[in-house]
Amino acid sequence: MYKRSEKVGEAIHEEVSRLLVKGIKDPRVGFVTITGVKVTDDLHLATIYFTVVGSDEERKATEAGLNSAKGFIRKELGKTMRMRYTPDILFRYDETIAYGSRIEGLLKQIHDEADHDAE
């Protein structure tokens, strides 16, 4: 059974993803993917997790662009979702992909070293 906050999170995910493609004109917001949205049970805060292709500087620029668009995003969410209260938005960089890549690299390094030692 879904909690209301999960349904709201899914709707926010879809709407913010749509806005990133069509509505946000900030040049700092490039190749961004929304990886998840977590909404508090009282529906007052939505933490939006994102990833971005590029360097650490590009990630920081993208995060700044997203943060500057918060007001626009909240306004659009209010229009499309017809909620009594539109949640505050908090953007967080989703480090799970980078973390997974790092682990994958370490495992490959261990495997390569084991192959080298076996020779």
Image: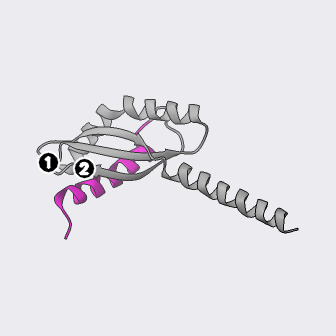
The residue labelled by disc 2 is 39
Location of the N terminus by quadrant is: bottom left
The boundaries of the magenta stretch are 1-24
Find the residue positioned furthest to the bottom.
1
Above or below, 41 against 63 in this view is: below
**Residue type, numbered disc 2:** Val
Find the residue positioned furthest to the left.
84
> In the shown orientation, is residue 27 left or right of residue 82?
right
The residue under the point 18% across, 42% down is 44
Q: Is residue 13 magenta?
A: yes
Find the residue positioned furthest to the front.
117
Disc 2 is placed on an element classified as strand
Q: Position of residue 39 (x, y in %)?
A: 25, 50
Numbered badge on residue 42:
1
Q: In which quarter of the image is residue 106?
A: bottom right
The residue under the point 11% across, 45% down is 84
The residue under the point 57% across, 31% down is 57
> In the shown orientation, is residue 43 left or right of residue 66?
left
Main secondary structure type of the part rendered in magenta: helix
Question: Decide: marks 2, 1 in contact (CB < 8 A)?
Answer: no
Q: Does the magenta stretch include residue 22?
A: yes
Q: Position of residue 100 (x, y in %)?
A: 55, 55
Which is nearer the eye, 3 or 79? 3
Q: Where is residue 35 in the image (x, y as percent from the top left)?
A: 42, 53
**Residue type, numbered disc 1:** Asp
